[in-house]
Every structure is written in structure tokens, then in C-alpha cells.
Image (cartoon, rainbow, N blue to C red):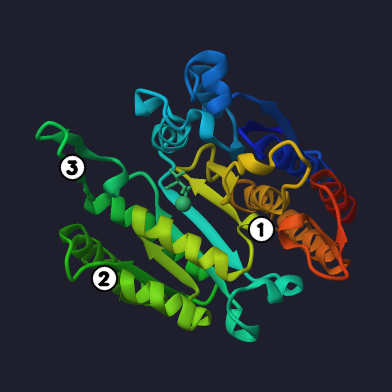
Amino acid sequence: MAYKIAVLPGDGIGPEVITEAVKVVRAASNDYDFEEALIGGIAYDQTGHPLPPATLELCRNADAILMGAVGGPQWENIQPASHRPEIGALLAIRSELNLYANVRPAKTLKALLNASPLKGDHGMIDVIVVRELTGGIYFGQPRERRDNGNTAVDTCVYTREEVRRISEQAFAIARTRRHEIVSVDKANVLETSRLWREVVTEMANANPDVKVTHMLVDNCAMQLVRNPGQFDVILTENMFGDILSDEASMITGSLGLLPSASLGPSKNGRAFGLYEPVHGSAPDIAGQGRANPIAAILSAAMMLQYTFGDLEGAQRIEAACEKVLDAGLRTADIFEKDCQLVSTSKLGEAIAAAVS
Ligand code: IPM
Ligand code: MG
């Protein structure tokens, strides 16, 4: 029987890039059935809620989720704020489905080495940021205004178990790579970071095959531009991971290229996860065929690898992306002299053709 993929195109360029991702997965394999549901601003407009119960239900019954992007200027000021796409859809689906492990690879593609803002080989990066996704200051209570609105409060909370389970993911990923983890915190200031460092240190002692070092987040931000090649796996909490993953991704040259996985507890013996491009909904270029579908396509490749254990299929999709870039096809965001400018769907078709 075919596996079931819940497809959530969302807003802005989401639908365009997801169409191409589905096209490429279909070219790679017959093992998957796709079913679409609403999420984000479009879901709010059509149903009054950015994450309708029917969508959540479809996701719970699926083997994996492929998502585009959510949000846009017309939904920025919705009241209550809990109905805005970023909070009511994105943070909500992460939390509802317990997708606590955000895996964000940032890897230089050879064809695009010159796109990095760091010069030449100095800009080579191949890192995976493992970001805790359902705890920390994003979700801590209370979160409120006091003092007639003049004081704002956010709360950062971590439990030992939350740190342990995300660290476990990082160890598993490190074992498929250089067996090295840099755990990033702010233990010179924050109590949550001191707990973080304590738990990661205990796990490092129990798993001596992986070399673990600790780094303060401000130093890490600096080291990433000074010498990105020193990093292999970065393990960190929710907000630091949000910031550092954007920084790492820009070093590759284009946010439009980077995939991500948000993994929860396994289901039916397989890792359950939501796969989405790191980029947002880019409303300014939506509907024009200008979006780069590669991040969405590589997210689908991550789905094959992490949920379905199809490493071969994932590698075929990655190789197809590289091949098409090597052949000089480019969307506008990564266009260079002497290359051929193509639309979102043309690039997707070329990648699908290179896969099958
Ligand atoms: C991300 C995004 C989200 C986050 C926003 C849109 C809520 O920046 O996925 O990195 O901060 O987690
Ligand atoms: Mg972010």
C-alpha cells in the first residue's frame, strides 16, 4: 500500500514550490499518495482558522507532511494574534504534533559557490543545525502585558527531558557524519542554558563516540562567518536555532535552496515529520513563476530519507538538483551571467526529468 503524504501548500509562493516538489517525488517513486489541505492565511480566509481541525486530522493520519509556507502582509494584524498564520498555523502545528526536532542542513552547492557572501573556499559550509522546536521562549508561560501594557513578559522554560530528546536526535545525526556536535547556549547568563549544558554534558559522557563541545551563542554567530567549515552539527535551543539557522543558510548563498525537517516521536516504526523549505511565503513574487522550487524539492528529499528511510531516492533527487544547476538553469534569485533564466515550473520539470 502507498504511503500517505499530507500536502499543505499554504500562502504566497508555497503552492508553486510544492507543486514542483510533488512532481519530483512522483518522478522518483510510485510509493506515495498525496492529499492536500488548507493551512495559513488562505485557511483563515476560507474557514476562519489558520490551522483548521480537518487539516490537523489529515496530518495526524498521514505518514508525513509536506508544507509550503504560510503568512503574508494581509494577515499580519489579525486579532487575536493567535489567529495569525505564523502563530496559529506554524507554531500551532509544531506544538500539536509534537514536532520537537527541527533539522536544518545548510550545505554549499558547488554550482553556486560564488553566491556565498563569504569569498571563495572560505564560504564552503556543510552544517546541520538541530534546533529544539517546541519549547523555550517561543512557548513559555506567562506571555503577557502588565502595567497597563507598559511591561511585556516572555518566559523561557526548558525541562531536562526536552533537552535530552533533542540531544538524542543530534547524536543520531552526528553518527551519520563527522561524529562531532557543537552545543550552543548562553550558559554564562541563562539558567535554562545551564540546565541545557548539564544535560548535554551527561549525554556526551554516556556517548563517548561523539565529540561534544560547548559554545556560547554570541561566539557561535561570530565563528560561523569567521570559519564555517569548523561546524558539522550544531545543537541548540529554539530561538538561538532560529537565528543561527538563518545565518548558516545565508552562507550557502541563497535561502531559496534550503530544506528542513521537523520531526516528532516515531509512528508505525518510522520518524514522523513535517518537511518544509526554510524560506517564507515571499508574497512579493507569488504567482509569477519566479520562486525557486529547490528548497521545497530538497525538503521532499529529506522526507524520503528521514521518514521513509529511502536514502537512495533522496540522493537521486539531490543529484538531480545539482545536475540541473550544473547545466546552468536558474531561477531569478540565483541567476548568474551566462546562465539560462527559467520559471519555477520549468526548473521543477527539469529536475523531475533528471530524477526519473
Ligand atoms: C522559522 C520561522 C518561524 C520561527 C517564524 C515564522 C514563526 O522564522 O521557521 O524559522 O521563528 O520559528
Ligand atoms: Mg526563522
Percent of width and height locating residue 104: 53, 58
- The residue to which callout 1 is attached is 257
Nearer the observer, disc 3 or disc 2?
3
| Image spot of residue 331 (x, y percent) | 78, 55
**Tag shown at residue 153:** 3
Direction from residue 260 to residue 204 in the image, left or right: left
Q: What residue appears at the point 72 percent right and 47 percent down from the top-left corner?
A: 291
- Residue designated by label 2: 201
Please, what is the three-letter code of the amino acid marked with disc 1? Leu
In the image, is the residue at mark 3 within 8 Å of ligand 1 by its beta carbon?
no
- Between disc 3 and disc 2, whose residue precedes? 3
Between the residue at mark 3 and the residue at mark 2, the CA separation in whole angstroms equals 30 Å
Q: Residue at x 9, y 35 (%)?
A: 147
- 199 versus 17 height, above or below: below
The residue sitting at 42% across, 79% down in the picture is 223
Instruction: Using a 10 Å C-alpha cutoff, classify the residue at mark 2 as few (fewer than 14 neighbours), some (14 to 19) or many (20 or more).
Output: some
From the viewer's perspective, is 237 left or right of 103? left
Q: Quadrant of residue 184?
A: bottom left
Q: Is residue 99 in view?
A: yes
**Which residue is depicted at the point 39% across and 36% down?**
95
Disc with the residue nearer the chain's start (1 vs 3): 3
Q: Distance between the residues labelled 1 and 3?
A: 36 Å
Which of 224/164 is in front? 224
Question: SS class of the residue under badge 3?
Answer: strand
Question: Does residue 41 sit above or below 341 in this rendering?
Answer: above
